Amino acid sequence: MHYYSFEKLDVWQVSRSFTTKVYKLTNKYPENEKFGMVNQLRRASISICSNIAEGNSRLSSKDRAHFFHISYSSAMEVLNQLIISCDLEFIKEQELNEFRTVINEITNKLNALYKKTISKKN
């Protein structure tokens, strides 16, 4: 089986696993949040790994860096929504902290990938 280069990136693997955890977490949100917070959290978490995959396929360093930046922004969006979820008592503070730790790992790896990308010349 052929694997694409993005699948070999550690940051993509971590963000893919993170997305699965977000889906499982949001399964226990109130039903009336299905089209609100649940939908937004899921879309933002998918955006993290999707933009890594798309960015990694771009030919220019500028394009790659742009998509890695979008991925970082999506991670911040997820964190914001998880903080609000905790405020609304949809999740416990311990769960928020566990997700925050993974977001920190993802964003650190994205920063490193971004810096490496912009330092390369086409």
Image (cartoon, helix red, strand yellow):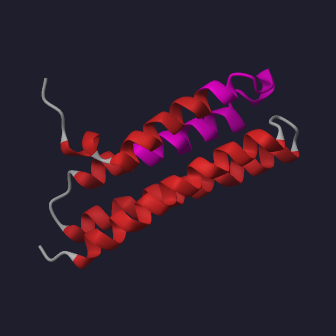
Residue 35 vs residue 57, the one in the foreground: 57
Residue 36 shows up from this direction: no
Residue at (35, 47) in percent of width and height: 10
Residue 81 vs residue 109, the one in the foreground: 109
Q: Is residue 12 left or right of residue 89?
A: left
Residue 102, percent across and down?
57, 48
Relative to 69, residue 12 above or below: above
Residue at (11, 73) in percent of width and height: 122
Residue 29, percent across and down?
76, 27
Magenta region: 24-50
Q: Is residue 97 left or right of residue 102?
A: right
Report the predominant secondary structure element of the magenta stretch. Answer: helix
Q: Is residue 75 left or right of residue 13?
A: right
Picture quarter containing residue 88?
A: top right
Residue 121 shows up from this direction: yes
Residue 121, percent across and down?
15, 77
**Which quadrant is the N terminus positioned in?**
top left
Residue 36 forms part of the magenta stretch: yes
Residue at (37, 45) in percent of width and height: 12
